[in-house]
Amino acid sequence: MRRLPHRQRCASTHDVRQDTPTTCVELSSSLRDEEGPVSLTELSLSWVCRHVKGLCVSREDGSLKFLHCPPSIAIFCVFLFSGVLNDQTVGIFQDVELLRLRRAFVQYSQISVDSFKLALCPHKLQELNVSHIHNNISISDILNSITSSTVCRQALRTLLIDGLRFYGETVSFSTLRGLKKLSLAWTDLDDKNLEEICSMPSLESLDISGTNITDLSPLMNIQSQLKFLTAHGLQKLSMPTSAIISVLSKLHLLMHLDISNDKLVTEGDHLAEKLLEHPGVFQNLVSLDVSGWGGVNDAAVRVFVEERRGMRFIGLLGTGAGGVELQSGDGMLKVAGESNLPQLCEALRRYRERETFIREVLAHLYTQTIEMEEPQPIILKLVLSVMRLYPDSLQVQLLTSACVFNLTQHELVLGMTSLLLGAAVKQLLGAMKSFPNHQQLLMNCLLTLCSDHILQVIPFDRYEAAKLIMMLPGNQEDQMLQRMVVAVLSNLVSQVINQSGQHHSMIK
């Protein structure tokens, strides 16, 4: 199951002209604000993506090259978000004299090793994201391609290669001497690789989440430079709690530490609690995430935060803590937890790519929104964004559809914009289409749709909605469900007929 079908996906280029600004625009179509209008930039780039072949000629190798590229072009974000980045279209960037890449985000793309090497590596890339790239490209392929280009090897500062594997002979990470940020989450990184990585002279940020690491001791080699460490989901870590704390406590420069546990451990060796109570650690810390570790108490959290006046975030989901008010030095502390709605909203934002946490958050959110008195459009927008990210997860769709009902029932629906409610209807219909045989999910969706305001005022394709609902299995035994189907259908059909009649009258 592909958990994340939509991500921010783009490539950015700067024109070589020295008199043009160096602004960089990034584009994300899937997470655009449902309530906001489409920007001119999005419309323009969408048009370019749809007509790219007409704007180019083919080289001998089949790759594309722009027919005309006016010198006034200072920025150009292109292709990947529309799914058109491939071996043919990426060839456009082979022209390093005309288009100059500084950042390339090509995660989930369909490009080969050769195309990656020819089109991207000749540029002075400062930031490169090749996470979850297709076509069986390995970490070894990526490193070998980067190091084959002197300009790319020397310029690169950020490298994200999540979800790939080590195959073949790999050039040493240490050759990337200027690299400051490296992410290898959910790869087969092992202790030997970590030892090598921890010899990199400039490394300040490291993500080793979900890897095969058993020993964190190599981190001691970069204790004088490491500022950001993300290390959640280390299921093979074999160090005792005292040894883990011993290593982490010596990373004096850490500003961000994430050791959260997706398994939501409720008992065990109390790693998070012992870390919080360890005297004098992490004086520079701005962000700490210990979500998923049980046994944490509010008193320890409060003391920890009060002693670190620069704290801006703490993750406490599933820890049992967070029930007391926490304040940093300037009152800017954000908490991801389950004790109240602000904590749950923060958790939805922070953990959107971690399904285990998302399910936990949604379960608490459902409970806390059962008797809402005021409309909460921000919460509804967050719920819908999660619903979009996990279309194939029955558990997520069940929980989100239940939360949508809580947030739109009775007069609450009147406090939501038409565009936001239209987005909600779209997601509910999508869930019904994906799981047409699941009675509880259908019930959740139909309960929301059984609203006069939604059925009569909100813009959506009523004809397609009626067709979908009519195609639902007819052997449902729940009489309440059958009544809701009939009620929604009759309303939709009457409106379709009325709209059709109005259309014919206008034609006459």
Image (spheres, rainbow, N blue to C red):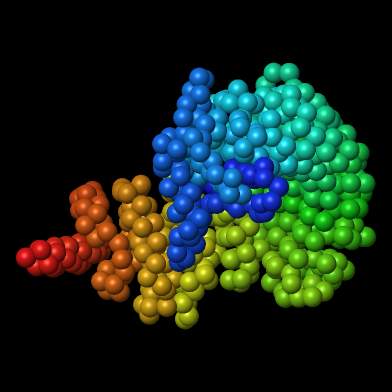
Vertical position of residue 367 compared to residue 204: above or below: below
Say whether residue 31 is left or right of residue 460: right
Q: Is residue 91 above or below residue 488?
A: above
Question: Residue 193: x and y, percent?
Answer: 79, 29
- The foreground one among 455 and 200 is 200
Residue 333 in view, yes or no: yes
- The mark total stands at 0
120 on left or right of 231: left
Q: Residue at x 42, y 74 (%)?
A: 416
In x, y percent, where is residue 215? Answer: 82, 36
Q: In which quarter of the image is the C terminus?
A: bottom left
- Provide residue 296's location: percent of width, then percent of height: 75, 61
Which residue extends farthest left?
A: 508
Residue 159 position by quadrant: top right
Which residue sits at x=58%, y=48%? 73
Please name whichever residue, 320 or 267, is drawn nearer the observer in this view of the structure.
Answer: 320
Name the foreground residue: 374 vs 65: 65
Q: Which residue is drawn at 58% across and 39% down?
A: 107
Image height of 426 relative to 216, above or below: below
**Residue 23 % position (x, y):** 66, 54
Residue 56 appears left or right of 428: right
